[in-house]
Image: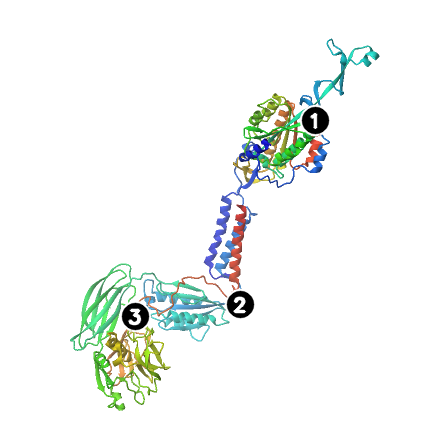
Amino acid sequence: MNWLARIRHDAVRGWVNPSGAEPEGPLLSAELLNRLESLSLHVGRHGTTGFAGEHPSARKAHSIEFADYRDYRPGDDFRLIDWNVYARLGQLTLRLTEAAEATTLHLLLDCSGSMAYGIPSKFRTMLRLAAALGCTALARYDSVAVGLLSGASAQALPRLRGKNETATLLSILEHLQPRGNLDLAAAVRSYCAVPRRGLGVLVSDLLVPSGTREAIVSLRKIGLEPAVLQVLAREESLPRFDGPVKLVDCETGKPLLATVNAAALRAYAERFASWTAEIETACASQHATFVRLYTDQPLEDVLTTALRGRMMQ
Amino acid sequence: MSFAQPAALLGLLLVPVIVALYLWRVLHERHVVSSTWLWTEAMAQFSHKPHRRLPLREPLLLLQIMAVLVLTLVVAGPRVAHAAGTHQIVVLDDSVAMAATDVTPSRFDQARQQVETMIRQLGPDDSLSLVVAGPHARLAGEIPGNIDLAAALQHLGPPGGNADIAGASALAQGIAAESGRGAPRVTFLAAPDTPPLQTGSLPVFIDRIGRAPLNDQSIGSLTVRCQSGAKACEAFARVRNYASVARANTLEVSVDGQPLGREALDIPAGGSLDLTFAIPNGSQTVKATLLAKDALASDNTAWAIVPAPVPLQALLVADNPGQLLTALRAIPGLELKLVSTAAFNYEDVGAYDFLVLDNFSPDGFPSIPLIVVNPPPSTVTIPVLGSNVFLPADTVDSSDPLVQGLDLSDLSTVGEKIATPSWAHVAVGGSNGPLLLDGTFGGARMVVLPFDVGHSAFAGNLAFPLLVQQMVNWLMPAPLAEVSAGASVWLPSDVQAVRDPSGAIETGPMIGASQLGVYAVAAGNGGRRPGDPLFAVTTAAPGDTQPVPASTQSWMPAIDLGTVQHGLWPLAIIGALLALSGEWWFYAKQT
């Protein structure tokens, strides 16, 4: 378990809670873990890795899974001709089957200080969500790779595969702690410095002035099928204060003095809406799955409603 | 509602100050957000001009205002109920310092006007007691009362003596303790240098009248000493300057009404000059006057009586007098006759001023001053418990005039162990009995030395003749020569009446020496002739008082104890402390 030793060594960098204390209980309940075994990741045909698995692939191969019919073209393998069709219609028609392949779930987790905001914190919600996705993947013999984004770099943890790595994944996630700031584009670019295939899931609040689009492009560029899960606290969309306030950035500690009134709240709401719209547009332009969820939403509801059909099935 | 200290209500001005501070310091509520960049962009179109409004829901503000209100009210002393009224106890300083004219017309007159004002402002339920702190503190009058206080005020003064502050304090406390006269409030009208009243828990408002230091030059003391056989006497005068700057003055001296001379003086600031000048033999009175005007005129003149040489007659009854005889013969002006115990005749005693009995006790002590040395066991008046007992000198009462200034470390000796009689005071005592007693027995002063002087090593000590001298001085005190103004004087037995400096006749045996100057014999017998100067009355020094305990009390708020109950003080203080504690707790929680 050299990689785990390295994780613990990284405690000095602030990503890991060295005490291992988890005041809020286990990330996933046993009941939820059981329910996750009946789910699987929804992976596009270009999101597979080429290894045998359970996800349909864009590649055609000999298998028992029927895919389609098409007319025979010279050079085609005679073994694929459906002779029953030829007997009935007198046409040479090929019976196509598709390959079932595995995928790798790349969980790119935002470990910046802003994720500590909210009750429960966005970080905690992100960890539970990542745990649910990871356990679902491991239950289907997919691989799980965790990338910790902080500052302008990413730390890629060793890939996990197989159901027996579930406990390891949960242990890793439970020991993470948010700290510092994040240059999203640079950090994702750092993670994508080596070719990777599979499903690239970026989990973050995306509270950065820029870089969201670049991050998705980076994921797409190396062949990952990008998905973006934006985790927000409800207070971020609906602030509940007014009057003269001193807003303290929990990442940088810098204060901002402001007088918040109805007009200011409207301006903030408008800016918030435009910002979220920009993110949605960026994701749509890169054909990336985008889901926004709030910390006050039950995880079970998120898995069965918000992610159902887009990332889970 | 009224207030005992209305000026304390100025403390309420702190409330708008606190409110202004809160308005000036806009309270920014602190909020931690995940990121401020969205806010920064959203608020770019708004300028940060916080609306200054009073945070009425701010607990810190409310606590501070509450603390100010409570403390102000406590200090102001609200008076709601007037059922019992107020009992004003005015203590008027009647010392010589109040005669100063540094305020117009004088300190005393101004104090008198203040008392008159207080009398006019009395309410129907109020009462007033006037205590005059002169040489003898006294109650001058009361309202309501049998004495017309307004008239009594007009007859006060002029002050010339010192102030009996201890007596005035006790008198004020006693008056305040009288029930049913409303809440006591003591006001002390005093000169700047007069010590404050010592009234325990009774609050006192002190109103100082006049300025300090006083521009005053005085003749602090004037005494005359005549050596037997000399052709002239010597007069000693001490001139003091109380001003903060040096003053030039002229001292004029006259003898028996005839000018003797003048001398120009430069008296240093806050200092004094000691002057000596010769007085012709045969003079009777000396008068010294500072001619320059100052703020206090009454102490610019002093009088002194030239002591007449009157030889003392003493009889020593002893068989072996030794050192005792030597010590008595060394006393100037003492004519001593020595007789043996066998030759002692009781009827001859009347011819002497005092008697010395050495190892001898007659059947009864005569009623003249006595020195009893080593009384035999048969002495009835002085119980002898044992003979040849070692008498260590363990305790010495240094305040006793017999032993003042003497080194009595070698006094321990062997002598008679006697019991201390009830009339006697132990000047030197020890574990085995007293070594020196003094007291008054049968109307005459008596000194007892319970050991044989001839066999004591102490007799060869230098302190022994000095002790004998002081014993004689105490037995036969010098005739009265000078008293302080306002003092009560017992006239000598051979003087029935005196003429005061104004020419009025006052008859004894006790008179009040209120006039400055020389009191002369008006009617006497024996060697007293009408017109003979008897004693001089001089002013006390400004600020002089009779001994009082040290006090640090200077000012205390006057509280109407009739309305603010005794139990309310702690409650008010506890309330203020609770408010401040709550403020502290809230502040600590905020930070």
In this picture, is B179 found above or below A108? below
- As drawn, the label of residue A42 is 1
Helix or strand or loop: what does disc 2 sit on?
loop
Whole-percent x and y of residue B72? 49, 56
**Mark 1, chain letter?**
A
Q: Are marks 1 and 2 in contact (CB under 8 Å)?
A: no
Q: How is the image coloured?
A: rainbow
How packed is label 3: few (under 14 Cα within 10 Å), some, or many (20 or more)?
Answer: many
In this picture, is B575 found above or below A139? below
Distance Cα–Cα, label 1 vs label 3 = 117 Å
Helix or strand or loop: what does disc 3 sit on?
loop
Distance Cα–Cα, label 2 vs label 3 = 45 Å
In this picture, is B371 found above or below B299? below
Same subunit under labels 2 and 3?
A: yes
Residue kind at label 3, given as amino acid type = Thr
**Mark 3, chain letter?**
B
Q: Nearer the viewer, residue A214 or A105?
A: A105
In the displayed image of the protein, which residue is found farthest to the right? A88
Same subunit under labels 1 and 2?
A: no
**Mark 2, chain letter?**
B
- The answer to whether residue B11 of the structure is visible from this angle is yes
* Left or right: where A82 falls relative to B232: right
- As drawn, the label of residue B539 is 3
Residue at x 49% of width, y 47% of height: B20
Q: Nearer the viewer, residue B467 or B483?
A: B467
- The answer to whether residue B478 of the structure is visible from this angle is no
Which sits earlier in the primary sequence, circle 2 or circle 3?
Answer: 2
